[in-house]
Amino acid sequence: MEIAIIGASGYTGGELMRLLLHHPSAEVVAATSRKLDGTPVASVHPHLRGLTDLVFQNIDASDIDADFVFLAVPHTAAMKVAGTLAERGIKTVDLSADYRLAKDIYEKTYGVPHTAYFKAPYGIPELHRDEIRGASFVANPGCFPTGATLAAAPLAKLAHTIIYDSKTGVSGAGNSPSATTHYPNVGDNFSAYKWTTHRHLAEMKQELSRLGSPARCYFTPHLLPVNRGILTTAHILLREPMEQEEVEALYKKFYADEFFVRYQKPTLAAVRGTNFCDVAVESEGDRVVAISAIDNLVKGASGQAIQNMNLMCGFAEDAGLRVAGMLP
């Protein structure tokens, strides 16, 4: 199957190409970039040198010649081409935020009108596999909502309040330099940002609602001086207390058939470069602490996008994604 990546010059585009090199049924045949038209992909993604001869192209969505497309562009950019791809019958996973939320919530959260809205499955396969399987367009979730939702999902219905506290690596901010991600401001430092207003909170609330949870939801992210990974601590306040053994059994049963969710002590190193989400819980009665670890560029973006592609196209769900973490 031939793949095109629209907006392939960023970190998620590079990760898609790296992971798809190992996919038995997919080959990237086009990587687009308006600014880098004619530039070899390996000059921007040097880890791919010797593994791809692709050159960035500036191609309109109407001229894409591929069986499947990944949209690795910023929000508002995806909605400009999604309709064209749908009309042409090209299956697509959108890594932007444009189709993750209901239209009114999207417009309120992002402060822009949605000019080409349609409903799309929300691509956390562990929760929405039946909707994703065979779909023609899937909205890939944000990195923070992925780790947070998988941490809390088994207990969501039993909670009255859930507080997410996430620590993320710098690559989550993308590859455009800024004062926030400038090394002297990040290295040997640790800080919170968007304490109560991060846009991903809307996705977290949406997923809790879909899980049938009445819980109030709060979220604060923090910036770690590491390249990759998100460690999320979910403080789950229960309506009725539960013992440790009961909570552990619930989580292990909930994720028993999920290859990419492992019940073990979460660390960033164990999931680095992989599509795994490691989860563990500890109960003190009416408060359960659930911790998850993901690679923000893989399970939090490109790896989950490929997992969704596999479901959409009838491939093995783990095709191209059976990769061990880079420990230490």
Image: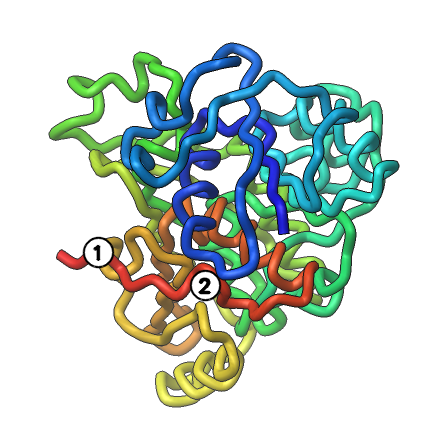
**Pick the front one: 198 or 112:** 112
| Residue that extends furthest to the right in the rendered view of this protein | 87
Q: Kindly indicate the quadrant of the structure image that contains residue 52.
A: top left
- From this view, report whether residue 99 is shown above or below residue 36: below
- From this view, report whether residue 177 is shown above or below residue 244: above
- From this view, report whether residue 106 is shown above or below residue 316: above
Q: Please tell me which residue is depicted at 26% across the width and 69% down the height of the picture.
A: 265
Q: CA distance from mark 1 to mark 2?
A: 22 Å
As helix, strand or loop, the secondary structure at mark 1 comes to loop
- Left or right of 309, for residue 49: left
Give the residue type that dot 1 points to.
Met
Name the residue beneath numbered marker 1: 326
- From this view, report whether residue 324 is shown above or below residue 62: below
Give the residue type that dot 2 points to.
Ala
On residue 151, the disc is 2
**Pick the front one: 16 or 1:** 1
On residue 1, the disc is none
Q: Dot 1 surroundings within 10 Å: few (below 14), some, or many (20 or more)?
A: few
The location of residue 224, given as percent across then percent down, is 25, 37
